């Protein structure tokens, strides 16, 4: 493992590769021009707008991995706490590199806002339902629609009227869209890479959930500590080190130490490798970052391999484990059944969603309704549906 000592100035990038966020920066502009705030910058305001959005608060009721919590562990992450962990990592990385940490924080806070209930299983089911109508569900595009249209907080405009930099980051943090298939996204520089502040969100997300899911999986008793020690050298190396340093420490604490060190080494590596790539490329400005042949926010080859191996282990032993299968089957049944029922009879939707059927067509309007729900809300809708069927 690498020596973890470094001096912070060695990781500072030139301010010219960062987004300034100044009032005259085109990336600070909003679709509906608003007067500048006397003491809050554009991205500070965006962070506040996201924090105060209804869709943000609903993240508390949406789970990532454990779709029906309670029985397994009281401490499993919700999408909200996962989001806060991503924000913490993103802020650290951006600040250490001299990037715009307020923008990175805003992007982290908004990055999962478009996710439907029931985690990945819910998203897959919703996407499959839409595919039957020649459509599809994409959580990044959905997030953009939430912040540009569904959130209604302002008398002057629909949505949150976020800056161009935040809207660009929402759709581009984890995926590159082509202008040919997505002409509606043309204002987001689709022929160019996103700024580093957006690029790093994808890795902050990967790092946060890798550590969190290991911890939650162990706490839930779905992952067996011995199996993790045997099959995840990334974890067991740190575990062994902690044990030699603290021979009397309880297993739980050694495990916590190992997860913490994994997280720390990934974040440190992300910062170092990103700086290395930017310097090696000779990129001196934001435009150079945008026109580079590939994203430069990266892990080094060796840590990327460790990350990928650990993720593979989590897929086999946690995400696709038999212990979680009943939850996935339930999620699929609930989402697909309600989707079909409401698409066939949109008059069963609440009035505001019925109004959108005329605009968007029933499949999309129903998918938007479902995507906004928390796990508890869709469970309630499911119980009501089942009761109506049986009456
Ligand atoms: Mg995430």
Image (spheres, grey):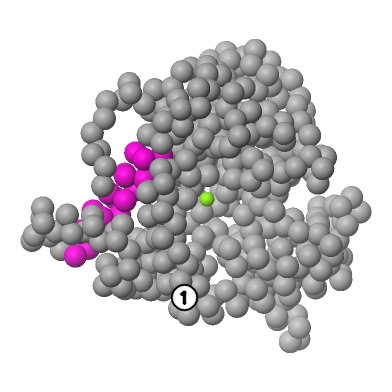
Residue 43 x, y percent position in the rendering: 57, 26
In the image, taking residue 297 as reference, residue 253 lies left or right, namely: left
Seen from the viewer's position, the closer of residues 117 and 9 is 9
Q: Is residue 223 above or below residue 182?
A: below
In this view, which residue lies farthest toward the left?
248
Q: Tell me which secondary structure the magenta stretch mostly adopts.
A: helix
Residue 38 x, y percent position in the rendering: 57, 13
Seen from the viewer's position, the closer of residues 181 and 131 is 181
Q: Residue at x 76, y 68 (%)?
A: 129
Q: Residues within 10 Å of mark 1 (few under 14, many from 20)?
A: some
Q: In this figure, what is the number of numbered marks?
A: 1
Seen from the viewer's position, the closer of residues 225 and 310 is 310
Q: Residue at x 84, y 65 (%)?
A: 133
Q: Secondary structure at mark 1?
A: loop
Q: Please provide the residue range marked out in magenta.
A: 251-271
The answer to whether residue 154 shows anywhere in this view is: no
- Pick the quarter of the image with the C terminus: bottom right
The answer to whether residue 61 shows anywhere in this view is: yes
Q: Residue at x 59, y 45 (%)?
A: 174
* Residue placed under numbered mark 1 in the picture: 321
Tell me, yes or no, whether the highlighted magenta stretch contains residue 239.
no
Res 42 quadrant in image: top right
């Amino acid at each position: 493992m690498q020596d973890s000592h470094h001096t912070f100035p060695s990781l500072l990038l030139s301010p010219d590769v960062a987004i300034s966020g100044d009032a005259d920066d085109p990336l600070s502009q909003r679709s509906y021009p608003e007067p500048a705030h006397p003491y809050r910058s554009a991205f500070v305001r965006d962070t506040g707008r996201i924090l105060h959005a209804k869709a943000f608060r609903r993240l508390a009721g949406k789970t990532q991995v454990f779709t029906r919590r309670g029985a397994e562990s009281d401490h499993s992450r919700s999408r909200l706490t996962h989001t806060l962990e991503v924000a913490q990592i993103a802020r650290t990385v951006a600040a250490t590199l001299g990037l715009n940490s307020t923008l990175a924080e805003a992007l982290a806070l908004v990055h999962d806002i478009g996710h439907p209930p029931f985690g990945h299983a819910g998203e897959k089911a919703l996407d499959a339902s839409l595919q039957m109508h020649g459509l599809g569900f994409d959580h990044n595009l959905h997030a953009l629609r939430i912040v540009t249209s569904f959130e209604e907080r302002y008398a002057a405009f629909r949505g949150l009227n976020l800056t161009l930099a935040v809207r660009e980051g929402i759709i581009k943090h984890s995926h590159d869209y082509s202008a040919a298939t997505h002409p509606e996204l043309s204002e987001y520089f689709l022929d160019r890479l996103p700024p580093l502040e957006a690029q790093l969100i994808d890795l902050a997300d990967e790092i946060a959930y890798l550590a969190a899911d290991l911890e939650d999986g162990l706490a839930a008793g779905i992952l067996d500590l011995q199996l993790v020690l045997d099959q995840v050298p990334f974890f067991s190396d740190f575990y062994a080190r902690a044990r030699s340093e603290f021979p009397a420490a309880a297993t739980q604490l050694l495990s916590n130490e190992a997860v913490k060190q994994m997280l720390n080494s990934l974040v440190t590596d992300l910062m170092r490798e990103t700086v290395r790539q930017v310097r090696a490329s000779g990129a001196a400005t934001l435009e150079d970052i945008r026109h580079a042949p590939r994203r430069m926010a990266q892990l080094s080859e060796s840590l990327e391999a460790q990350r990928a191996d650990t993720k593979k282990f989590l897929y086999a032993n946690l995400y696709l484990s038999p212990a979680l299968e009943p939850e996935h089957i339930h999620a699929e049944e609930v989402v697909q059944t309600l989707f079909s029922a409401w698409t066939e009879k949109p008059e069963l939707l609440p009035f505001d969603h019925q109004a959108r059927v005329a605009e968007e067509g029933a499949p999309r309007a129903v998918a938007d309704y479902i995507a906004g729900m928390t796990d508890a809300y869709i469970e309630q809708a499911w119980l009501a549906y089942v009761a109506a069927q049986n009456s």
